[in-house]
Image (cartoon, helix red, strand yellow):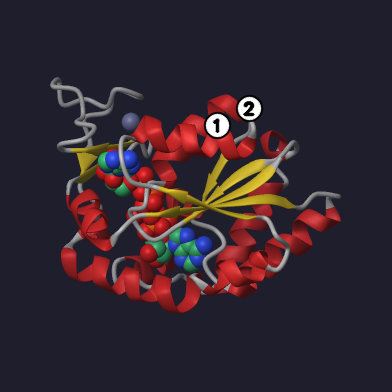
Amino acid sequence: MDLILFGPPGAGKGTQSKFLVDRLGIPQISTGDMMRAERKSGSALGKKFDEYMTQGLLVPDSLVIELLRNRLVQADAKGGAIFDGYPRTVDQAKALDAMLAEMGRRIEKVIALEVPTEAIVDRISGRRSCEACGQVYHVSYNPPPSTGRCGNCGSDRIVQRDDDREEKVRTRNAVYLENTLPILAHYGDKGIVAKVDGTGAVEDVTRRIESILGK
Ligand code: AP5
Ligand code: ZN
């Protein structure tokens, strides 16, 4: 199955993806995580991503679509994927539809997480991420282990993302409203968009998503 986890920055897409990977047995494809890994490697492509990501702006479609194309042909993504943070523009959505169609696949569901702005600000300002494996924590709602090491991979590099500062978050939100939200109308026409209340405990949100997926 191919599904998109959709929502504004900080809505909980990454958090919920991690649970769905286990339940559905398909990988999470997060373009944000892939780009952060590329930046960390210090490659020329990573430096290009830097220019946009540190400002909270979208990386140009041509670069993102290429990144996704290379990821989609990897063996673990043959049976479907959870798309997290992709697509971000209607053109990216159309490119994804075309790539999947070539493989005889299509997006079956778009799960749109709805979270009010006040909660988003609180979630993003308290977020901490493991630089090594991408595991997401929150200082209050899901604190990292008291050892200071990542519970998933053992790394001691649990940091605040450079685009999680208040001013960058405002830019990311504006970009979301202008460029990303129109994607819902693109998929809405196909009748596959399911809006999900993204507030409350992480497990409650997971249960709401599972009930929509019939799992
Ligand atoms: P990306 O990494 O995709 O970031 P994003 O979409 O802004 O989403 P976030 O990672 O901020 O939030 P999330 O919804 O995953 O929430 P999370 O689960 O972490 O993109 C970053 C940048 O990369 C972009 O700005 C752009 O520059 C570039 N980029 C990436 N993809 C691109 C593309 N396709 N095209 C162009 N550019 C692209 O949760 C947030 C916090 O809340 C965490 O601390 C978590 O612990 C907590 N939390 C989650 N759920 C709950 C809950 N139910 N209750 C309490 N706390 C919760
Ligand atoms: Zn880790």
Residue nearest the observer in this picture, 37 or 82:
82
Q: Residue at x 54, y 58 (%)?
A: 86
Can residue 43 be seen here? The reply is: no
Category of crowding for the residue at label 2, using alpha-carbon neighbours closer than 10 angstroms: few (below 14), some (14–19), many (at least 20): some
Quadrant of the frame with the C terminus: top right
Image coords of residue 20 (percent x, y) = 53, 33
Q: Residue at x 74, y 36 (%)?
A: 79
Residue at the farthest bottom position = 178
Quadrant of the frame with the N terminus: top right
Give residue 175's quadrant in the image: bottom left
> Is 212 on the left or on the right of 73, as rendered?
left
> Is 170 on the left or on the right of 16, as rendered?
left
Mark 2 — residue? 25
Residue 214 numbered mark, or none: none
The alpha-carbon separation of the residues under discs 1 and 2 comes to 5 Å
Whether the residue under disc 1 has CB within 8 Å of ligand 1: no
Where is 13 relative to 58, above or below? above
Residue nearest the observer in this picture, 62 or 82:
82
Give residue 149's quadrant in the image: top left
Image coords of residue 70 (percent x, y) = 66, 52
> Is 174 on the left or on the right of 149, as rendered?
right
Residue 21 numbered mark, or none: 1
Where is 176 relative to 142, above or below? below
Can residue 152 be seen here? The reply is: yes
For label 2, the SS is: loop
For label 1, the SS is: helix
